[in-house]
């Protein structure tokens, strides 16, 4: 009787265990990767700190081309165009007493014709009082004083009475004399620019000729300023 052939069943071979060398190699590789990663991370941190310190301590570079500043124009007040040697413009006006005063009244005498901004203001008061106090000395030089502003005759009268001013103050409300002597124009006070009377004194000789123009008026000692100019 024939025997049945038994089917040979293939036995699965068990997976070979990794050798000790392979394991060690893999572990070493992983360690190296971790170390490398850690080193790179530390280096990055160190570089970041260095950069921060350098940025903090390094002075800011000044711009080689600074921004150009817009030049501020210096204000120049108006100044009369009349100069010594010119014939004095004729003037005629009403004084504080309501009387007419004109240039021809002073033929044979020198005239101190002074223009001032306003009655009873600090600078104008100081100037008027200086001329009042020095009037005797000025008279000895054959000089008469005439003041001019755009105030009214009534305002001039109050001003003259308050400070005992013994000379003529002409009310030039229409600014005819002021403009004839070119003392009306742009001026500046407390940073504000406006049109007004430019404080100026003209000294006119006996023949009606301008011999001096004082633009830089010393209000506190104007009489002395004039005397010195006349060589007295």
Image: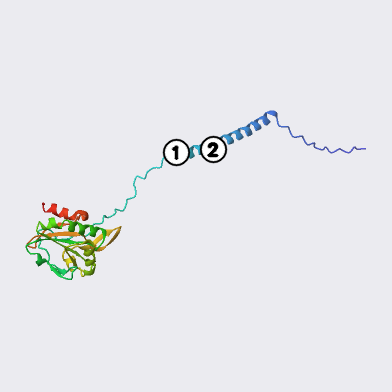
Q: Position of residue 11 (x, y in %)?
A: 80, 36
Determine which residue is flagged by label 1. 57
Q: Is residue 150 visible?
A: no
Which residue is nearer to you in this view: 45 or 20?
45
Specify the label residue 45 is tagged with.
2
| Residues packed near mark 1 inside 10 Å, few (<14), some (14 to 19) or many (20 plus) | few
Q: Quadrant of residue 139?
A: bottom left
Q: Position of residue 18 (x, y in %)?
A: 71, 32
Q: Position of residue 186 (x, y in %)?
A: 24, 61
The color scheme shown is rainbow
Taking the view exactly as shown, the residue that stands out farthest to the top is 21
- Whether 5 is drawn above or below 85: the answer is above
Mark 2 → mark 1, Cα distance in angstroms: 18 Å
Q: Is residue 230 left or right of residue 26?
A: left
For discs 2 and 1, the disc positioned in front in the rendered view = 1
Q: Secondary structure at mark 2?
A: helix
Classify the position of the N terminus by image quarter: top right
Which residue is nearer to you in this view: 119 or 229?
119
Q: Position of residue 213 (x, y in %)?
A: 15, 57
| Residues packed near mark 2 inside 10 Å, few (<14), some (14 to 19) or many (20 plus) | few
Q: Secondary structure at mark 1?
A: helix
Q: Quadrant of residue 199?
A: bottom left
């Amino acid at each position: 009787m024939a025997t049945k052939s038994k089917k040979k069943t293939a036995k699965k071979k068990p997976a070979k265990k990794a050798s000790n060398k392979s394991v060690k190699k893999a572990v070493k590789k992983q360690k190296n990767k971790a170390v490398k990663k850690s080193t790179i991370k530390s280096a990055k941190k160190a570089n970041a700190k260095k950069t921060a310190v350098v940025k903090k301590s390094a002075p800011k570079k000044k711009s080689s081309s600074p921004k150009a500043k817009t030049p501020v124009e210096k204000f120049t007040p108006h100044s009369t165009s009349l100069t010594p040697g010119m014939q004095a413009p004729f003037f005629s006006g009403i004084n504080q007493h309501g009387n007419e005063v004109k240039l021809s009244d002073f033929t044979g005498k020198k005239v101190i014709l002074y223009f001032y901004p306003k009655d009873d203001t600090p600078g104008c008061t100081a100037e008027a009082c200086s001329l009042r106090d020095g009037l005797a000395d000025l008279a000895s030089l054959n000089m008469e004083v005439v003041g001019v502003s755009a105030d009214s005759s009534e305002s001039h009268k109050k001003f003259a009475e308050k400070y005992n001013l013994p000379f003529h103050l002409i009310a030039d409300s229409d600014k005819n004399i002021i403009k004839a002597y070119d003392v009306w124009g742009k001026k500046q006070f407390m940073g504000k620019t406006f049109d007004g009377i430019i404080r100026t004194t003209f000294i006119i000789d006996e023949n009606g000729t301008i011999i001096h123009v004082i633009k830089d008026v010393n209000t506190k000692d104007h009489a002395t300023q004039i005397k010195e100019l006349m060589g007295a």
